[in-house]
Amino acid sequence: MNRLSMPVIAYELNGDDRITAVSSDWAEFAAGNDAPELTPGNVLGKLIYDFIAGDDVKELYRILLRRVRDSEEPLMYPFRCDGPVVRRYMTMHIRARAHRLVDITCITNRVEPRDPIPLLDRRARRTRLPVPICSSCNSVRLGISHWVEADEAIRQLHWFDLDDQPALSHTICERCLAEKYSLLP
């Protein structure tokens, strides 16, 4: 898959939040993003939470999935799925089906190439110092509630000069958290 292509990644969850089906783009997207642990054979039958980093991010997914199942109203929200050389602007659609099944479709709306960012490279050596990164907008926290784009964080903190990149600690920034909770009744 071309890094700049616009895949539609879809998957189905059963009532226990286990992945029961994935779209044809799934495997190609995983391989193209250096994520062999996310191939269909490795994810089918597993809990979605096994593949979500950060306890607060997992809890947000639980809340959103419960809301969709209970209300049977679909939910849609924007998010970022960046890689070391691209910014991906995507939209997640969550829809309930019979028997508490849920369909999740992630549509790539726009892809922007960028200069390589070692912070987002899965193969980069990491320090033990965790750096909070928002799982929804990919902003990095610099201070108590100051969030900036990953590129800006790298510039401000001179991370380009480091041999080892900081460890990423996935969370949700205050702006994205408010946005996601505004979707709830």
Image (cartoon, rainbow, N blue to C red):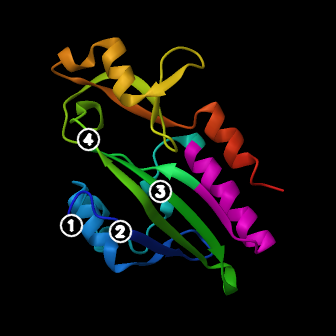
Residue occupying image coordinates x 34% and y 71%: 26
Residue occupying image coordinates x 65% and y 32%: 174
Disc 2, SS: loop
**Few, some or many residues within 10 Å of mark 2 (<14, 14–19, 20+):** some
Q: Label 1 is placed on what type of residue?
A: Met
Instruction: Say which label, 4 or 2, has the lower sequence index.
Output: 2
Q: Label 2 is placed on what type of residue?
A: Pro
Tell me which segment is drawn in magenta: 57-77
Relative to 75, 131 lies left or right? left
Alpha carbon separation for disc pair 3 and 2: 10 Å
Quarter assignment of residue 7: bottom left
Residue occupying image coordinates x 61% and y 55%: 61
Alpha carbon separation for disc pair 4 and 1: 16 Å
Mark 4 = which residue? 84
Instruction: Say which label, 1 or 3, has the lower sequence index.
Output: 1
Alpha carbon separation for disc pair 4 and 2: 17 Å
Circles 3 and 4: CB atoms closer than 8 Å: no
Q: Tell me how many marks there are.
A: 4
Mark 1 = which residue? 1
Mark 2 = which residue? 7
Q: Residue furthest left?
A: 163
The N terminus sits in image quarter: bottom left
Circles 2 and 1: CB atoms closer than 8 Å: yes
Instruction: Say which label, 3 or 2, has the lower sequence index.
Output: 2
Residue 18 drawn at (x, y percent): 51, 71
Relative to 179, 31 lies left or right? left
Q: Label 4 is placed on what type of residue?
A: Pro
Relative to 172, 109 lies left or right? left
